[in-house]
Image (tube, rainbow, N blue to C red):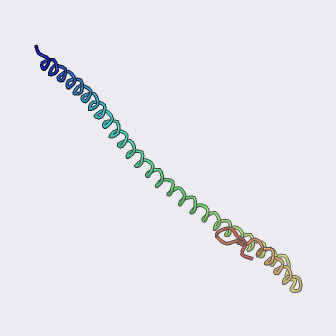
Amino acid sequence: MGSSDMDLNESFQVLEEKISKAGEVFKRAVAEKRDLELTLKNLKESSSDSEKRFETLQREVQLLRREREARVEAEAAQEQMAFLARASELFAESLDYVSMPDNVVSLIESSWKNIKDASGKSVY
């Protein structure tokens, strides 16, 4: 065998090594692609779960707001009932026309201090 045959054999060996390395690189690339596809799939599922959790939290916030508004309304109704009960007591206590207006004014003034709007701030 001549030197050109050796050169040809060496070239084939180098070429086979390069092909082998290229095959390994290709296998790693395929494996990385699979991993990336799996990661992307998990991210999409996680995103979907996060959106569902966000929607659930939004509904809970709305329910808490409604509950707070209902509580404020119930407290206002309770204060009104207490006012009416106290006013009834004052009217029933006596028919003293001289002291009754002062009692009513005093009752109204003390009630105004407790009147609040829906946000809980004093109106007067």
The relative height of residue 97 versus residue 64 in the rendered view (above or below) is below
Query: Front-most of 9 and 45?
Result: 9
Question: Residue 80: x, y in percent?
Answer: 70, 72
Query: Front-most of 91 and 46?
Result: 46
The relative height of residue 62 versus residue 1 in the rendered view (above or below) is below
Question: Residue 104: x, y in percent?
Answer: 81, 80
Query: Front-most of 27 and 115?
Result: 27
Q: Residue furthest bottom?
A: 97
Q: Is residue 15 left or right of residue 54?
A: left
Q: Residue at x 31, y 31 (%)?
A: 28
Q: Residue at x 40, y 44 (%)?
A: 43
Q: Within the image, what quadrant is residue 124 found in?
A: bottom right
Q: Within the image, what quadrant is residue 37 found in?
A: top left
Question: Residue 73: x, y in percent?
Answer: 63, 68
Q: How many numbered dots are placed on residues in this image?
A: 0
Q: Within the image, what quadrant is residue 3 found in?
A: top left
